[in-house]
Image: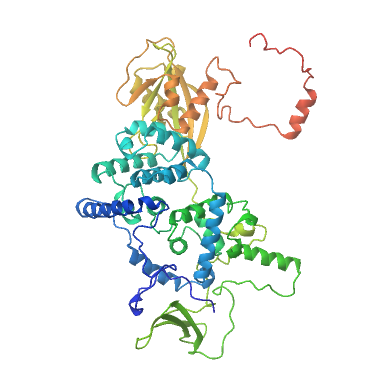
Amino acid sequence: MNPCPHIQSCPLQKLSPTGHTSAPQPAKSKPAIMKKPRTAVRSRHRKQASRQEGREKRVLSSSQVKPPTPNGLARRQEEVVLQASVSPYHLFRGTAEVRAFRENLLRWYDREKRDLPWRRRAEGEVDLDRRAYAVWVSEVMLQQTQVATVIDYYTRWMQKWPTLQDLASASLEGVNQLWAGLGYYSRGRRLHEGARKVVEELGGHVPRTAETLQQLLPGVGRYTAGAIASIAFGQATGVVDGNVVRVLCRVRAIGADSSSALVSQHLWSLAQQLVDPTRPGDLNQAAMELGATVCTPQHPRCSQCPVRSLCRAHQRVEREQLLASRSLPGSPDVEECGECRPQPSPALSGTCSGSLIPIYPTTWLSLCRAGPWPALWAWHLSSPGLRGTWGSLFPAPGSGQCRLCAPPSEPWDPTLGVTNFPRKASRKPPREECSATCVLEQPRAVGGPRILLVQRPNSGLLAGLWEFPSVTTEPSGQRQRQALLRELQRWAGPLPATRLRHLGQVVHTFSHIKLTYEVYGLALEGETPVTTAPPGARWLTREEFHTAAVSTAMKKVFRVYEGRRPGACKGSKRSPVSAPSSWKKPSPGQQLLDSFFRPHIPRDAPSLNSTAQ
């Protein structure tokens, strides 16, 4: 029988004289503030954290906060119940395996980690609040966004608002303007709200623990709170993001739906067990780095993985390769999930398994059959000085389908290798909507041509951003033009309806909406230029448009308009996105024919455009 899996904390810990924790730690460690590499500032950091903890308690008792999250004890009790119901195959078997994972991963991270601006800023910052702010901004920006995209936005953000106080004093318009193009625009708004709350209600001090971060700050969930607390403040708390999900599912061969509540709870439990109490922030970043650069979704580089020897998915691939090559007789000795593997039926029942599993130096776990196989097993906790044992019943190994393995309907695919894990959850397709939008331009306005933008509502999709006048409507038809004209006249007054031209189509997919924009254009050529706009609207120059708080979808719409307006150069960079939408790249055969019939022009021949240049 396998050794006892990790148990973060036992609800029956009163049975043990001293209790136990999720990972091997010194007998009397101090989990409140972890050690920092800068010995000269440790004492000051402890004092700051102590004073801040008192402030947080006063704030929690006097202000309205988000609904309380499960406290540490409740979470540990849930984890114990979960661990008692899953196969040890999906757990780390003991302190030696956990220590090997930490050491190998941190050694690799120290050698291979990427040089990123938020890491440099956090590592070089002594002030805890400024360090937390630097981590906070990066973690919010990195949600659902690639690192390469975030680097430029993060650099410009920190140059403009280097401190929480600077961000709190900024306008939401300015925040939206800098965030434009990064997507998921509510993130920037929530970050701005959080900065204002820290400055106005928390005395300029960021909460010091994952629990208070999640409770007090808007838009900060469990992952973001854990990342800030571990990286900035050294709290030994694990984190689970998309990269960590992928790493843990492969390392422990978890094939069930990773978005399910059961699997999510188990992954958080594993992450908490693995976090290094001396380097929690580095361990969390190392796990995310591993998933982003080595244990990637489609093309993992297993040969470069520092925890390959502990990876059950990799072991499964090796076993399949050995079986396929038939280089060894029989089956290789590779561990499988005991819940899913068929078990022989013993003749006797009601007898002890004969295995005592240490879960703490003075506490032992024994497994005994409580009925005919494969009915029930009982687990018993025993400790010196106790009169008897305490236990509970759970299904015996091999008695049914493991809840952490892939369902029988989705068997192992040898062509996928380790990418069999994690199982991709079936996503609900985004709902489809259609919108008619119009670029209304005054070509002869004072100071140069101007276009009309209107502001979206302060809530909902793209809240507070600017866009061209638009209406949600049917995919096509005369009603669409009429609805759009009414919307235009609401902002700009009477307009020449006959000049409204359909230019093309732009399809833009948000997280849950596939939105098709029918793009129209209308130029006010002979009308008297308008110098003012009603509240919620603006007439902007082209240069002002490109720096305004507009979404990527609106920039696509404007490129369609620029490419179709009279006199536009069809070879310019502002060619239409999907107009005409039927154009396709020539096939290789067509390209070959085109090159065959194209006349040969010597390299030294004068260019037809040489006079224009």
Q: Which colour scheme is used?
A: rainbow
Residue lying furthest left in this view? 62
**Closest to the observer: 483 or 433?**
433
Would residue 125 be visible to someone looking at this image? Answer: yes
Image position, residue 207 (x, y; %): 31, 50
Q: In this view, does 2 lie above or below 425?
A: below
Q: Is residue 347 above or below residue 540?
A: below
**Closest to the observer: 525 or 138?**
138
The C terminus: image quadrant: top right
Query: Residue at coordinates 37% horizontally, 65% vertically from top-left?
Result: 29
The N terminus: image quadrant: bottom right
Query: Residue at coordinates 45% horizontally, 46% vertically from top-left?
Result: 143
Q: How many marks?
A: 0
Picture quarter containing residue 226? bottom left
Tell whether 199 sits left or right of 267: left
Residue lying furthest front in this view? 40
**Closest to the observer: 243 or 281?**
281
Image position, residue 492 (x, y; %): 35, 20
Query: Residue at coordinates 41% horizontally, 52% vertically from top-left?
Result: 227
Query: Residue at coordinates 33% horizontally, 51% vertically from top-left?
Result: 45
Image position, residue 387 (x, y; %): 34, 88
Picture quarter containing residue 327? bottom right
Q: In this view, does 435 lie above or below 343?
A: above
Image position, residue 205 (x, y; %): 29, 46
Would residue 465 be visible to someone looking at this image? Answer: no
Tell whether 613 sits left or right of 517: right
